[in-house]
Image: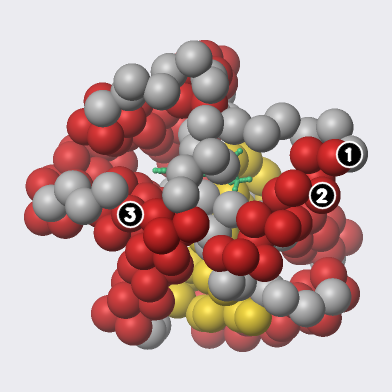
Amino acid sequence: MFITFEGPDGSGKTTQVGQIANTLRERGHHVLLTREPGGTAIGNQIRQILHDMKNQAMHPRAELLLFSASRAQIVEEVIRPHLKAGGIVICDRFFDSTYAYQGYGHGLDLETLRTITQFATGGLRPDLTILLDIAPEAGIQRRLSALAQGEEWNRLDAMALEFHQRVRGGYHTLASQEPGRWVTINADRAVAEVQADIVAAVEGRLDKQS
Ligand code: TYD
């Protein structure tokens, strides 16, 4: 089973994916937890380019192709082999981030994005996608407190508020188009409450697949 997590910056994905991965491991599942962009040695080098505050001049099309290159690598090197071996893969962001950020956020043509994504993934699609939904204002606040605790503030965090609002709207549209794959969870609550909803969503899907 392939599970992806999506949501605006500051939605708490990283904490939540770590917890659900541990829960599933405790229950005996073979779980691989990874993230995009990154997740491979090559992907991590691409991630550095994408995050670098010096790269303000990056064109959205160049950005899209870098995300897609990282994705092509992680799919073949990490995700497919683990799924083939019968494990569960949890990925912190996947192609829906491209539709939300590069498509709805930057206004790149969605049909073109679908073609490039299909090429990059070789057609691999998540079985379950969990949207951790939060208003951009609240998400940015969370990112600012993380920054105060020493986390990096990256080039993508620095995008304008309207951009993040378009991203969130994009996620809502994507989720409504494929209700069988998406589960939307209100992420503007305590970590444990959000996690309880995630566990329920994942359990529901595992029951269906077994
Ligand atoms: P990251 O530090 O991983 O943030 P987060 O913890 O919120 O996932 O940075 C990833 C950033 O890249 C985030 O702002 C979303 C953006 N992104 C895209 O714009 N397109 C994509 O295809 C992906 C995977 C991420």
CB at mark 3 closer than 8 A to ligand 1? yes
- x, y percentage for residue 131? 53, 70
Residue 111 quadrant: bottom left
Q: CA distance from mark 3 to mark 1?
A: 28 Å
Residue 3 quadrant: bottom right
Image point (82%, 49%), residue name: 145
Badge 1: residue crowd in 10 Å (few <14, some 14–19, many ≥20) = few
Q: Secondary structure at mark 1?
A: loop
| 11 vs 159: above or below | below
Amino acid type of the residue that numbered disc 2 sits on in the rendered structure: Ser
**Labelled pair 2, 3 in contact (Cβ < 8 Å):** no
Residue 149, label in figure: 1
Nearest the viewer among 35 and 10 is 10
- x, y percentage for residue 55? 43, 18
Image point (78%, 34%), residue name: 151
Amino acid type of the residue that numbered disc 1 sits on in the rendered structure: Gln
Q: Pick whichever of labels 3 and 1 is earlier in the sequence.
A: 3
Q: Secondary structure at mark 3?
A: helix
Badge 2: residue crowd in 10 Å (few <14, some 14–19, many ≥20) = few
Residue 57, label in figure: none
Amino acid type of the residue that numbered disc 3 sits on in the rendered structure: Gly
Q: Secondary structure at mark 2?
A: helix
Q: Which residue is mark 2?
A: 145
**Labelled pair 1, 2 in contact (Cβ < 8 Å):** yes
Q: Which residue is mark 3?
A: 105
Image point (49%, 15%), residue name: 54
